[in-house]
Image (cartoon, grey):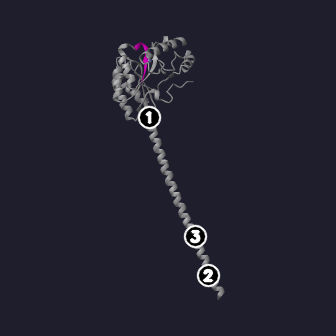
Amino acid sequence: MMYMKQRHKKRAGLLVISLLFLCLLSEAFVWQMQMKKVKETWQESMEEKMEDENRMQSEVKKIAYITFDDGPSQYTARILDVLKMYHAPATFFLIGTNICEERKPVLMRMEKEGHAIGIHTYSHNAKEIYASNESFQEDFMRAEEMLNRYFPNHKMNLYRFPWGSENAYLKPIEKGVFTWLREKKITYVDWNVSGEDSVGNPSGSQIFENVKKDVTRFQEPVILLHDSSINKNTVSILPCILAYLQENGYQFQTITTMKNPYQFPKD
Ligand SMILES: [Zn+2]
């Protein structure tokens, strides 16, 4: 009888221990599941946060660099007025022979209103500029000297080749030219979007279409426009171009703020 009682006690004990063990096991399982859920939720919120940051970064990175070649001209003041209205800093690549005392006020405005100024050429005559390394340097230095006279506080280290850095006139002498510019610490800049406003006599809407067809492909478009006596239509369409860029999320900056100023790819 005693023996039977002891066996029942032992069984009951084992049962209690088994039950306790099962309880612990299920607790551990529930806790593990809860931890998994917490981890998943945390991961999801981190992913969402990263996506938001990436979206914000890519939105911030949309910067349009408007550039005007061939100025100053009789239209420069109007261009400056439009840029001011849209709070749009731009970059002007100037021609030496277009600079004179009468245009000093617009040149001063360019600087005062936060635009960047670069050298384009003195003569804008392909046969003169690209005749030889020496001719290239001579043309460049004449323009540089002229600009230094009007902008004594401005470091002239930006340059745009007339017809761009891939033009056929430059090819035979390009090696020497690139080396010379590098030694002088001059950065040249090309473009990836063009208003095509110096070819033929396009209407304002044609210029606008030329910009629109390419510009949204780039997060950092460098847009080529002209400021010369033939560019009346560029001035009249400029507000539409700037408004379109703003509506598409672009901010405006000068080339001097571009990390790697755009240059045509070389072979
Ligand atoms: Zn030009």
Q: Label 2 vs label 1: CA separation?
A: 80 Å
Residue 95 painted magenta: yes
Mark earlier in primary sequence (2, 1) = 2
What residue is at 58 percent from the left and 75 percent from the top? 16
The residue labelled by disc 3 is: 22
Q: In front here: 196 or 97?
A: 97
Q: Which mark is residue 9?
A: 2
How many C-alpha atoms fall within 10 Å of the one at disc 1: few (<14), some, or many (≥20)? some
The residue labelled by disc 1 is: 62
In the structure shown, which secondary structural element does the residue marked by tag 1 occupy?
loop
In the structure shown, which secondary structural element does the residue marked by tag 3 occupy?
helix
> Within 8 Å of ligand 1, the CB of disc 2?
no
What residue is at 37 percent from the left and 35 percent from the top? 247
Q: In front here: 96 or 101?
A: 101
**Image location of residue 261, percent across then percent down:** 49, 27
In this rendering, which labeled residue sits more in front, label 2 or label 3?
A: 2
**Image location of residue 5, percent across then percent down:** 63, 85
Give the amino acid type for the residue marked by disc 2 in the picture.
Answer: Lys
**Image location of residue 205, percent across then percent down:** 35, 26
Give the amino acid type for the residue marked by disc 3 in the picture.
Answer: Leu
Q: State the count of labels.
A: 3
Mostly what secondary structure, the magenta segment? strand
